[in-house]
Image (cartoon, rainbow, N blue to C red):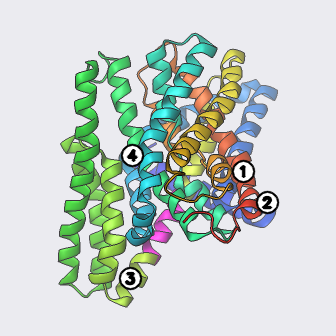
Amino acid sequence: MNLLQITSLLIVLAGAFGSINYLFLRLPSSIGILVVALFASFVVMLLDLAVPSLGVTDMVRSTVIGIEFSEALLEGMLGLLLFAGALHVKLSDLRREWVPVMLMATIGIGLSTTIVGYGFSWLTGMPLLVALVFGALISPTDPVAVLGVLREADLEKSLETKIAGESLFNDGVGYVVFLVLIGLAFPHGDGHGAGFAGAARLFFQEALGGAILGLVLGWLTFRVMRRINDYSLEVLITLGLAFGGYELAVFLHVSAPIMAVCAGLLIGDVGARYGMSEETRHYVDAFWKLIDEILNAVLFLMIGVEVFAIAFDFAYLTAGIAAIALALFARLAAVAVPVLMLKPFRTFSEGVIPIMTWGGLKGGISVALALSLPDGEWKPMILTATYIVVIFSIIVQGLTVAKLAARMGRAPELLR
């Protein structure tokens, strides 16, 4: 199948599964599409077991593998999703929460990676560096998987901003940490770098370079938009910034996700206030909300059908179930440690830690990073464990976090 055929198939299935969810399941849109896609995938597998001569599973598996989920997300959809997410987070809100956001996106990612890595190595016998790679790819949280659900719980703005900001930045930081550890664990793989000196250099090049590029491109785009009063052209310019900036970051070997977040934050706040008319703001906001919804529908559909790419081995499934508990404990540490560090200087509600722990959903970036690993004896186990953690996170945590947030998050002030 060519690119146009694959794209058409994904959009048709996303629309069909979304309609089934809307008419019958009534789950949050993205989670509902994932559930229907997962159910349809298992039906196909059971049909193939009942009538082996059909060979349906092999045909679907070859189609799913041909989609190249990792490349589609990391080199295409991720930039648009992060840009769209950052566009709706105001710098003024983020400025008030920048300390906990920064600590959770840096120290939190480091803690989570270390805990999962050491724990998974001990559980499975996997080499420590390879297990740390698994820790890095399973640590980032998915902002789009949880924010829509959390809004239904009527959270305090400060907590919502903290969840959104941390998720946006820890996606980028987690990706950089993943690249660094890949260079250490597979030095002859894809050339990300070798040795700790190369790893440190790569980290600063990717993280700092991505932030600088995003701010520079965002500022230049803002200066151009100030001179224009044509909403259709300005929408096109923001789309060009998201697409072109992401590809430029890849070309310059700096962090494209961090670039997308920084550019989106600048355009969504400074650009919206000083570079757009009221009409343009309305159209830009509506356009990117629509892009966000469509891409998320397709992304969660793709996560659902990626079940065909995992290995149904008992040892792998057991490791995946153990990894759920490990990932939750690591997430608890990633949230609790920064909160405890800041407690002498800030007032926190007791609800912040459980809400942010249970609300730290994993998503498509974890599956994409697992699929991008070099082939080897440990890749099937990592991919299976990653998939199990992501599915549990989105379905179980995603469907219950709103109730937890509603019960614990309606205090007069969760975070000051």
- 392 shown above or below 186: below
The secondary element bearing badge 2 is classed as helix
| Residue 375: assigned label | none
Q: Position of residue 319 (x, y in %)?
A: 66, 21
Counting residues from the start of the chain, the first of labels 4 and 3 encountered is 4
Query: In terms of image quadrants, where is residue 106?
Result: top left
Q: Mark 2 belongs to which amino acid?
A: Leu
Secondary structure, mark 4, is: helix
What is the span of residues highlighted in magenta in the rendered image?
286-295
Depth check: give the residue in front, 33 or 213.
213
The label nearer to you, 4 versus 3, is 4
- Judging by the rendered image, the residue that carries numbered circle 1 is 36
**272 relative position to 327: left or right:** left
Which callout, 2 or 3, points at the residue further toward the start of the chain?
2
Q: Residues within 10 Å of mark 2 (few under 14, many from 20)?
A: some
Task: Give the residue number, with chain letter if any, for mark 4.
Answer: 172
In the picture of the structure, the residue carrying the numbered disc 3 is 281
Spatial CA distance of label 1 from label 2 is 9 Å
Q: Tell which circle, 4 or 2, labels the residue nearer the N-terminal end.
A: 2
